Image (cartoon, helix red, strand yellow):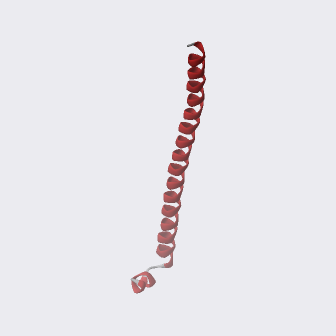
């Protein structure tokens, strides 16, 4: 493997290296965007649950006070 790479022209090695770096960066940014979207989804879900929970609790108290 090392001898094969050494036998390549420097331009080919450089191009392969740049392609590998670019692929790694794309993979990393894709993983970060998925993680960020998941975090936003979780935050939105928890925020919606909290506001709904307070609303339901408020309605329950009103209902109990009426009866």
Q: Residue at x 48, y 67 (%)?
A: 20
Tell whether 40 sits left or right of 12.
right
- Residue 46 spot, x, y in % from top left: 56, 38
Tell whether 67 sits left or right of 3.
right
- Residue 7 spot, x, y in % from top left: 42, 84
Q: Residue at x 58, y 34 (%)?
A: 50
- Residue 57 spot, x, y in % from top left: 58, 26
Q: Residue at x 51, y 73 (%)?
A: 14
Foreground pick, 11 / 32: 32
How many numbered marks appear? Answer: 0
Query: Residue placed farthest to the top in the image?
Result: 66
- Reply above or below: 59 against 18: above
Please identify the quadrant where the N terminus is shown.
Answer: bottom left
Q: Residue at x 55, y 13 (%)?
A: 67
Query: Residue placed farthest to the bottom in the image?
Result: 3
- Residue 40 spot, x, y in % from top left: 56, 43
Foreground pick, 1 / 45: 45
- Reply above or below: 50 against 33: above
- Reply above or below: 59 against 49: above
């Amino acid at each position: 493997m090392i001898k094969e790479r050494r036998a390549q022209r420097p331009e080919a090695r450089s191009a392969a290296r740049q392609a590998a770096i670019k692929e790694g960066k794309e993979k990393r940014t894709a993983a970060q965007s998925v993680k960020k979207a998941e975090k936003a989804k979780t935050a939105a879900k928890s925020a919606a649950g909290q506001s709904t929970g307070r609303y339901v609790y408020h309605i329950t108290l009103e209902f109990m006070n009426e009866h």
